[in-house]
Amino acid sequence: MLYKNIKTIRKSKGLSQQELAVKLNVVRQTVSKWEQGLSVPDSDMLLSISEVLDTPVSVLLGEHVIEPPENDLKTISAKLEVINLQLAQRKGTGKRILHWLFILLCVWLATIFVLLFLAGSPYLGWDYEKPETAVLGVAVHSLEWLFVRAAPMAFVGAAVGSFLTRKKE
């Protein structure tokens, strides 16, 4: 049935096998095999054929679809309801992911603070007379200094963010 429909619709659109093949980026023999029923296009190609022939996939597959009138208010409201539910689910999923990322950031920052506290500042006891040690010690001290000053603000921001994105019941 598919092979007959492709051939009939292609001819009704005034396209040759070669022209259809060029539009689908395949060789003419492929179109010929489809129309003879020797092979079947995959789902992606079926969508491409549908677009090129400006025909729904269901018609290509042989279904006769009776479309509801476009002015039917119930149909439109049902479609809008489905779209609204999908958007609400996406928003909820994004909010949950963001909530857990904020919690993860809080835990990560607290863990780093505890590790820094337990380790002290071991680089302070290094021999700074060697240039390599001096450069490395300054770099480590700079990172620790920056972390100790920026992390509390990030922690508070993450805590507030996790509070604001919590699931409200």
Image (tube, rainbow, N blue to C red):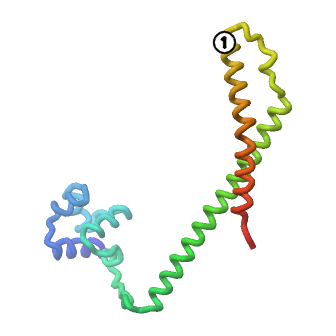
Q: Which image quadrant: the N terminus?
A: bottom left
In what quadrant of the picture does the C terminus appear? Answer: bottom right
Q: Residue at x 57, y 76 (%)?
A: 85
Q: Residue at coordinates 45% horizontally, 86% vertically from top-left?
A: 76
Question: Is 152 drawn above or below residue 89 in the view shown?
Answer: above
Give the quadrant of residue 23.
bottom left
To which quarter of the image does residue 49 belong? bottom left
User: Which quadrant would residue 34 be assigned to in this image?
Assistant: bottom left
* Type of amino acid under label 1: Glu
How far across and how far down the image is residue 152, in percent?
A: 75, 43
74 horizontally vs 105: left or right: left
Q: Residue at x 14, y 72 (%)?
A: 14
Q: On screen, 14 above or below 119? A: below
Q: Is residue 87 above or below residue 144?
A: below
Q: Is residue 65 shown above or below 139?
A: below
Please name the residue that numbered disc 1 is placed on. Answer: 132
Percent coordinates x, y for residue 165 in the rendering = 69, 62
Mark 1 surroundings: few (<14), some (14-19) or many (≥20) residues within 10 A:
few
